[in-house]
């Protein structure tokens, strides 16, 4: 029987969506087969839109390709072309949005021209920047085309972060403290009276509303805001970036005084997806009474950050709206968002998503939060008499209900006419509005797996159709808008979860340029959105290699699954991640990070409430695992263990030379047979701390430490078998030997498991009662009705199967010695993060442990990663370094743009620049480890003696062995 291809034919996301085939005339009237959309985005959403449109019966759709897809990065050629073979429906532009304001305007006109010249009547922009570009949407509408997404008026009212915040205040939605009009304040500082502002309007010939100009009661800042909007329309600047930076610096200094021990977030109003945001004030977090010098130093970081965020969102050109929100960064918060859908008349909320697990402002793991799911979790916690958990979940339910109500009210106020997301931060039992993303979100499928939409004929409740895709709903709204009745949300599953598979290294830093050469097939229950990478060559049915291009963000794919509750969805996601095999060259992903993280929660409580501060301390904890694991030598441990048992045999049979020789030989052979059975999985776990983190988490209840010794609470044979399963090394005859347990090891393991099961069942014990079984088997006198001869054989077999497995206990000791279990989930679901894991120096050091810096000579500074090199903060500004200059530790040396994120690289030590050996100007591509500067460090580097390292490693390993043998 042929296996189902869950990539092409997944019942969770694929279905016949052709409403024209319905027997109902009312349903048929909502067919979208006449829609002719041009898809102008890339990534997983492009492939998803192509699939959905085809399933809707839309035959005339096209896609837009950037030349970067095929020319700059030839092996990154859009894999979707294996599906869309009609070259007349594939259109090309140099890039999707242009590098400057002039290029962006040119690109907008080019896209509209392509659409009109090729018979398209609508444009879909997915979740890229263009999807929230009010100017782009307005131009589309002016050209007589439909935009599949919120209209330009909604974009203006809700999409711009400053306007959205003002609207939220008007409709009684709670917002975070801060400043939302810093550009207006900049202008008022420059023209500090009503008369001066009016004179500016006249001097620049700005077209302003006369009523507003004559309103003497209007505040100076409100007047300045109106004048600025007119200047944007004319394409001129009324202030310089330097003046804006100075104003932001002044504002944040005042906010630092008002909110001590706080950080603040700078957000470009046109940003999104983590781009165009920076957080400043880390140095003040732990300072109780910061003096003016400390405040000034922290605020001095603002100008560089303002330039970075404006550059990232391409709002640094003449005439661009450069407003930057300054918001209090509420530290112990969760990031929740509500999915909205509207048609301009009605607006419906579709539950929430918790996106707190993030880093570098990039979401990593997104979890559904629905009223149905929380009610089920509350009922379960009540049945288990977990009072504190019940209270915590009931609090979350109330917050969710308020967020859903406020979000629908906001959507109604702005006339939301498509899909959008209402984003909030949650602080225990309170929430604050952050922003609205006027587009479909990357994580929208999390909602789709929880709810479907039921559109019912107002005249006949038995006449209806179901929609399970937000992309489909957006197309319906674009085509039929006000005709669509308000839908009812219908529960599909109580829980869903999404892991973003990104091209990042073990420390979650971007890692571009890798080549994917193999990707295992999706399993049942897995949704894989990967823009078509997993689509096989249609001619050879073989996987086609794919280049992870550095021109785009780090996301490779979205991996989703669902369940009847969160525990079920996490267990399923763990299985999805376990079953995923990715191979390639120079390839790094966060697959193992996700696997370790999901199992961290499975080993504690999946209903935990991690905050947005969770991931960095967690990574630091994982780094300490790696640092400790690096000190151990498994092979040395195995041979030392053999010596230990040889010593025990000698002590027992020392007075019987013939018996001793025989027993020594038997013991050596017995342990040798187990050598690879024990050491292979241990080496794998010690090599990857993310895997070790997950393994320690799920094995928390299988051991205890007593007086410095490891005591097993579960049969180590069972733990070893589960370890092979956990590492996806379980026996599968069709797989290469390097990937699975070896034949002879599997045979021995199965024999041991079979023996242990029979003995355990004979004594009526459960598998978690190993300590009781062990106690019985340590008795010399026969137990369980066995005679002495049989009892001796049973004890001998038990000893034979389990001898040597003590070595696994060394892994538990790593967790104990690194205080791994100090980071935990309390009964009220709050996550405890030990203070030491928030130490900035430790975090920086553990990042280097997870991903050691590239090898370098003592007199060089090399590129920390591949990407686009910039030697100055912005065009026209002085370079960071010059030949002959002295630099201090933490001083900026250069910027690397990798996957659309600008990373300022700081000096790891102090020294002097002797020569700049980096060839090429700003924008030059550099490789990881490429020499940039010849330097003379202030302090000489001390080379480490490898022999000394090896000696210390063996001494540490010996210490561990004493605790397990």
Image (cartoon, helix red, strand yellow):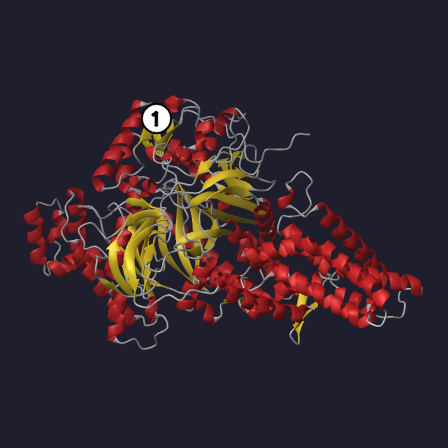
Q: Position of residue 476 (x, y in %)?
A: 42, 33
State the quadrant of the C terminus.
Answer: bottom right
* Res 374 visible: no
Q: Is residue 820 above or below residue 166?
A: below
Q: Nearer the viewer, residue 685 or 40?
A: 685
Tell me which residue sits at (35%, 58%) in the image.
172
Q: Which residue is mark 1?
A: 120
Crowding at label 1, few (<14), some or many (≥20) Cα neighbours within 10 Å?
many
Tell me which residue sits at (32%, 72%) in the image.
260
- Residue 648, by quadrant, is bottom right
The furthest residue to the front = 657
- Give the left or right position of residue 317, taking residue 560 as reference: left
Q: Dot 1 lies on which element?
A: loop
Q: Position of residue 565 (x, y in %)?
A: 59, 52
Q: Position of residue 541 (x, y in %)?
A: 55, 28
Q: Is residue 156 above or below residue 659?
A: above
- Give the left or right position of residue 864, taking residue 569 as reference: left
Q: Nearer the viewer, residue 335 or 386?
A: 335
Q: Is residue 121 above or below residue 589?
A: above
- Give the left or right position of residue 838, taking residue 72 as reference: right
- Residue 904, by quadrant, is bottom left
The furthest residue to the right = 787
Q: Position of residue 941 (x, y in %)?
A: 37, 65
Tell me which residue sits at (87%, 61%) in the image.
793
State the quadrant of the N terminus.
Answer: top right
* Res 93 visible: yes
Q: Nearer the viewer, residue 421 or 637?
A: 637
């Amino acid at each position: 029987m042929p296996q189902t291809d869950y990539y092409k034919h997944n019942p969770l996301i694929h279905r016949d969506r052709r409403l024209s085939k319905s027997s109902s005339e009312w349903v048929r009237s909502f067919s979208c087969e006449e829609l002719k959309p041009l898809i102008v985005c890339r990534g997983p959403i492009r492939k998803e839109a192509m699939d959905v449109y085809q399933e809707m019966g839309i035959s005339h759709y096209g896609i837009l390709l950037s030349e970067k897809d095929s020319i700059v990065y030839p092996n990154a050629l859009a894999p979707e072309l294996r599906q869309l073979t009609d070259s007349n429906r594939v259109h090309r532009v140099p890039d999707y949005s242009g590098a400057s304001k002039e290029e962006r305007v040119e690109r907008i006109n080019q896209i509209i021209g392509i659409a009109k010249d090729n018979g398209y009547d609508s444009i879909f922009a997915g979740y890229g920047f263009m999807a929230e570009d009010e100017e782009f949407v307005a131009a589309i509408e002016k050209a007589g085309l439909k935009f599949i997404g919120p209209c330009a008026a909604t974009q203006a009212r809700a999409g711009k972060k400053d306007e959205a915040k003002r609207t939220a205040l008007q409709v009684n939605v709670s917002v975070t403290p801060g400043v939302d009009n810093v550009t207006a304040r900049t202008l008022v500082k420059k023209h500090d009276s009503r008369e001066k502002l009016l004179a500016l309007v006249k001097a620049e010939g700005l077209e302003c509303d006369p009523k507003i100009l004559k309103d003497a009661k209007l505040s100076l800042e409100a007047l300045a805001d109106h004048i600025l909007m007119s200047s944007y329309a004319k394409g001129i600047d009324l202030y310089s970036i330097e003046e804006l930076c100075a104003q932001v610096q002044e504002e944040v200094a005042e906010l630092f005084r008002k909110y001590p021990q706080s950080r603040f977030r700078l957000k470009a109003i046109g940003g999104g997806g983590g781009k165009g945001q920076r957080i400043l004030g880390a140095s003040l977090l732990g300072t109780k009474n910061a003096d003016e010098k400390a405040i000034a130093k922290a605020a001095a970081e603002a100008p560089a950050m303002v330039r970075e965020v404006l550059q990232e969102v391409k709002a640094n050109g003449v005439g661009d709206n450069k407003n930057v929100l300054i918001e209090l960064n509420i530290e112990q918060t969760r990031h929740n968002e509500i999915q909205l859908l509207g048609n301009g008349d009605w607006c419906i909320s579709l539950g929430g998503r918790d996106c707190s697990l993030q880093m570098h402002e990039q979401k990593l793991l997104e979890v559904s939060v629905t009223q149905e799911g929380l009610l089920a979790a509350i009922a379960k916690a009540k049945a288990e008499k977990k009072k504190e958990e019940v209270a915590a979940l009931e609090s979350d339910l109330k917050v969710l209900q308020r967020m859903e109500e406020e979000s629908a009210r906001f959507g109604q106020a702005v006339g939301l006419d498509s899909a959008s997301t209402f984003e909030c931060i949650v602080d225990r039992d309170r929430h604050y509005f952050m922003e609205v993303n006027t587009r479909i979100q990357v994580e929208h499928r999390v909602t789709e797996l929880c709810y479907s939409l039921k559109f019912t004929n107002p005249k006949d409740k038995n006449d209806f159709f179901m929609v399970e895709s937000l992309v489909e709903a957006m197309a319906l709204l674009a085509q039929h808008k006000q005709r669509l009745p308000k839908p009812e949300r219908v529960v599909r599953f109580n829980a869903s979860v999404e892991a973003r598979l990104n091209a990042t290294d073990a420390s979650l830093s971007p890692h571009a340029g890798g080549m994917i050469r193999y990707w295992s097939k999706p399993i049942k229950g897995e949704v894989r959105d990967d823009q078509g990478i997993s689509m096989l060559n249609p001619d050879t049915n073989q996987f086609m290699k794919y280049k992870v291009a550095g021109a785009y963000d780090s996301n490779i794919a979205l991996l989703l699954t669902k369940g009847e509750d969160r525990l079920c969805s996490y267990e399923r996601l763990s299985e999805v991640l376990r079953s995923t095999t990715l191979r390639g060259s120079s390839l790094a992903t966060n697959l193992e990070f996700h696997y370790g993280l999901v199992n961290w929660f499975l080993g504690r409580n999946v209903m935990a409430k991690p905050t947005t501060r969770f991931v960095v301390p967690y990574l630091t904890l994982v780094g300490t695992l790696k640092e400790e694991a690096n000190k151990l030598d498994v092979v040395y441990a195995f041979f030392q263990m053999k010596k230990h048992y040889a010593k025990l045999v000698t002590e027992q049979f020392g007075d019987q030379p013939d018996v001793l020789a025989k027993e020594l030989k038997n013991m050596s052979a017995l342990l040798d047979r187990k050598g690879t059975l024990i050491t292979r999985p241990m080496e794998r776990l010690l090599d990857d701390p993310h895997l070790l983190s997950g393994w320690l988490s799920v094995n928390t209840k299988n051991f205890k430490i007593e007086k410095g010794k490891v005591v097993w609470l579960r049969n180590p044979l069972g733990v070893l078998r589960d370890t092979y399963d956990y590492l996806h090394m379980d026996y599968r005859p069709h797989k290469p030997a390097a990937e699975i347990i070896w034949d002879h090891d599997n045979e021995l393991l199965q024999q041991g498991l079979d023996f242990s099961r029979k003995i355990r069942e004979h004594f009526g014990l459960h598998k978690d009662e190993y300590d009781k079984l062990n106690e019985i088997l340590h008795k010399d006198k026969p137990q369980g009705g066995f005679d002495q001869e049989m009892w001796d054989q049973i004890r001998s077999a038990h000893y034979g199967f389990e001898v040597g497995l003590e070595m696994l206990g060394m892994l538990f000791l790593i967790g104990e010695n690194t205080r791994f279990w100090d980071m935990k989930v309390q009964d009220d679901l709050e996550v405890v993060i030990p203070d030491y894991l928030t130490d900035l120096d430790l975090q920086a050091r553990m990042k280097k442990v997870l991903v050691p810096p590239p090898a370098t000579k003592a007199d060089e500074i090399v590129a920390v990663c591949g990407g686009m090199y910039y030697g100055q903060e912005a065009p026209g500004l002085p370079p960071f370094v010059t030949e002959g200059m002295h630099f201090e530790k933490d001083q900026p040396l250069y910027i690397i743009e990798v996957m659309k994120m600008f990373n300022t690289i700081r000096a790891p030590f102090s020294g002097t620049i002797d020569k700049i050996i980096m060839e090429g100007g700003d924008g030059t591509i550099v490789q990881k480890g490429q020499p940039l500067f010849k330097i003379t460090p202030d302090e000489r580097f001390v080379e480490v003696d490898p022999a000394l390292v090896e000696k210390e490693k063996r001494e540490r390993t010996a210490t561990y062995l004493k605790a397990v043998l």
